[in-house]
Image: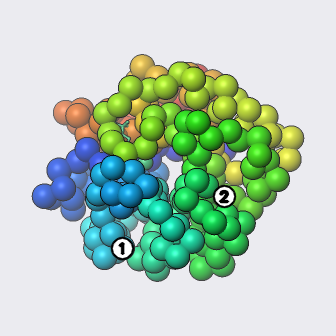
Amino acid sequence: MGSIQITPSILNADFGRLGEEVARIGSADWVHVDVMDNHFVPNLTFGPTMVEALTRSTDVPLDAHLMIEDADSNALAYVEAGCGSVTFHVEAAKAPVRLAREIRAHGARAAMALKPATPVDPYEDLLPELDMLLVMTVEPGFGGQKFLDLCLPKIRRARELMDKHGVETWLQVDGGVSLETIERCAEAGADVFVAGSAVYSADDPDRMVAELRARAEAATA
Ligand code: DX5
Ligand code: ZN
């Protein structure tokens, strides 16, 4: 397991002043950027031009979470926009191995996401191709949803498979992660934590990042 990382999602930040919003989370390890196309999920957010502008507003690296159809044709635009990590959904990728290799070859970390109903076992052999696996803990599309405890066994299983293969793949969770739920995720084996509404509804978002980190670290100590 890698060290604990907190990756706040700006989905619930004020889109009218994103530059200032990312400046409020200076201690975050990554800024999690939710890219939605209104097809893979029923919501629409940013494209590569916006993401490229965001890279110029912060020194924190960007972690793009692509909730888009046809990930194969569109993912590299986010590497070129300057994201340090690009996550595609396996449900939207026609050739996930090729796509992961292309993302790496272009210089970003390659990550693959699983929706709550997608099992991890069929993808065991892909783990060495991935720098991070994202286990969604809500149905993707919106911030502020309730954490799905039914995903915890999959987090545990993913961690077992990573240990079995001896890979250094990070294990990220996304959806409903808060001070109340982060310990469960950390105990199950997650090491990278997305938190959207928990961070941006706090009076001091950066302090919330620190509190989430402390709680996850305590749960795995
Ligand atoms: C949901 C997004 C999440 C979302 C998390 O589809 O992938 O990153 O912003 O928001 P919270 O933490 O509020 O569930
Ligand atoms: Zn996300």
Instruction: Quickly name the residue at label 1.
Output: 48
Viewer-proximal residue among 144 and 121: 121
Instruction: Tell me the element at label 2.
Output: loop
Q: Is mark 1 within 8 Å of ligand 2?
A: no
Residue at 42% across, 19% down: 180
Q: Give the amino acid at mark 1.
A: Pro
**Residue appearing at x 55%, y 36% in the figure:** 116
- Marks 1/2: CA distance? 21 Å
Q: Residue at x 21, y 62 (%)?
A: 19
Residue situated furthest left in the rendering: 16
Left or right relative to 131: residue 137: left
Q: Position of residue 111 (x, y in %)?
A: 60, 58
Residue 155 occupies which quadrant of the picture? top right
**x, y percentage for residue 183?**
53, 23
User: For numbered disc 1, what is the local secondary structure?
Assistant: helix
Locate the C terminus by quadrant: top right
Query: How many other residues sit within 10 Å of disc 1, few (<14), some (14-19) or many (≥20)?
Result: many
Residue designated by label 2: 131
